[in-house]
Image: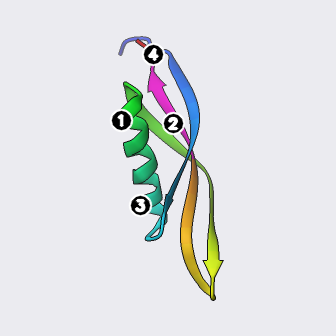
Amino acid sequence: MSDHVYKVIEVVGSSTKSVEDGIENAIARANETIENVEWFKTEEVRGSVMKGKVAYYQVVLKVGFRLN
């Protein structure tokens, strides 16, 4: 295994469907603008309730990408 150096950023993904969709939305968007996205860590899950039901989910992620 080669030695690598990573940078970590924080992103927030959201979805009206699920936590998993929020994660996938965040990773997909980060991957569009950042090269070498390799891992993520879930930091926080939160959401909004409207009329007694979950309106949307928000997931705060730390995303790591390998520097060239």
**Which amino acid is tagged 2?**
Val
Q: Are marks 3 and 1 in contact (CB under 8 Å)?
A: no
Of the two numbered discs 3 and 1 on the same chain, state the one appearing first in sequence: 3
Counting from the top left corner in percent of width and height, residue 49 is at 63, 78
Residue under numbered circle 2 = 63
Which tag is nearer the camera, tag 1 or tag 2? Answer: 1
**Image-based side of 53 in relation to 31, left or right:** right
- The kind of residue on which mark 1 rests is Glu
Q: Which mark is residue 67?
A: 4
- Mark 2 residue element: strand
In percent of the image, x 46 and y 47: which residue is there? 26
Query: Within the image, what quadrant is residue 44 found in?
Result: bottom right
User: How is the structure coloured here?
Assistant: rainbow
Q: Left or right: 55 with respect to 16?
A: right
Q: Amino acid at mark 3?
A: Asp
- The residue indicated by pointer 3 is 21
The answer to whether marks 3 and 4 mark residues whose Cβ atoms lie closer than 8 Å is no
- Which residue is depicted at the point 43% across and 71% down? 17
Residue 9 magenta-drawn?
Answer: no
Label 3, label 4: how many angstroms apart (C-alpha)? Answer: 27 Å
Q: Element under label 3?
A: helix
Q: Quadrant of the N terminus?
A: top left
